[in-house]
Image (spheres, helix red, strand yellow):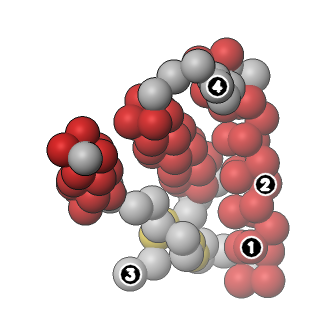
Amino acid sequence: MVRNTLVLLAALSVTACMQSAPSHWQHKTIPSSQWGSDHNRCKRAADRYLGAKPAYQADQQISSYNEQMRVYNVKKEHGKLVSDCMRKAGYVPMK
């Protein structure tokens, strides 16, 4: 019971500290109708990159806490890759 509570508190703390990647982007010269497709292209590129890394594959033998941390790290890395891709394409995050 105590272990489950600690795991839940750790997961909540990690979630609260996590900075979410911007979900909306804008570009000065590209038409707004293309922004969504460019964002999807960057998300697919991040999916392909992370899918090729064995460290990001699911492992059924690890504890629930370790699995939660692995998922957190994958989401964080995915958001960073998407943000980097969008910025390289000339986009800036919308507030």
- Between disc 1 and disc 4, the foreground one is 4
Q: CA distance from mark 1 to mark 2?
A: 9 Å
* Above-or-below relation of 18 to 68: below
Q: Where is residue 95 drawn, in percent x and y?
A: 38, 81
At label 2, the amino acid type is Arg
- Between disc 3 and disc 4, the foreground one is 4
Q: In percent of the image, x 29 and y 53: which residue is there?
A: 8
Q: CA distance from mark 3 to mark 4?
A: 39 Å
Looking at marks 2 and 4 on the same chain, the residue that comes earlier in the sequence is marked by: 2
Q: CA distance from mark 3 to mark 2?
A: 21 Å
Q: In percent of the image, x 78 and y 54: which residue is there?
A: 41
Q: From this viewpoint, which residue is outermost toward the front?
A: 1
Asked if the residues shown at circle 2 and circle 4 are in contact, with their CB atoms under 8 angstroms apart, the answer is no
Decide if residue 86 is on the left or right side of residue 7.
right
Q: Which residue is mark 2?
A: 41
Q: Which residue is mark 4?
A: 60
Looking at marks 1 and 2 on the same chain, the residue that comes earlier in the sequence is marked by: 1
* Above-or-below relation of 74 to 63: below
Are there few (<14), some (14-19), or many (20+) residues within 10 Å of tag 3?
few
At label 4, the amino acid type is Gln
Q: The residue tagged with tag 1: helix, strand or loop?
A: helix
Q: Where is residue 29 drawn, in percent x and y?
A: 66, 74
Are there few (<14), some (14-19), or many (20+) residues within 10 Å of tag 4?
few
Asked if the residues shown at circle 1 and circle 2 are in contact, with their CB atoms under 8 angstroms apart, the answer is no
Q: In percent of the image, x 46 and y 28: which residue is there?
A: 63
Q: In percent of the image, x 58 and y 19: which residue is there?
A: 61
Q: Where is residue 18 drawn, in percent x and y?
A: 31, 55
Asked if the residues shown at circle 1 and circle 4 are in contact, with their CB atoms under 8 angstroms apart, the answer is no
Q: Which residue is mark 3?
A: 95
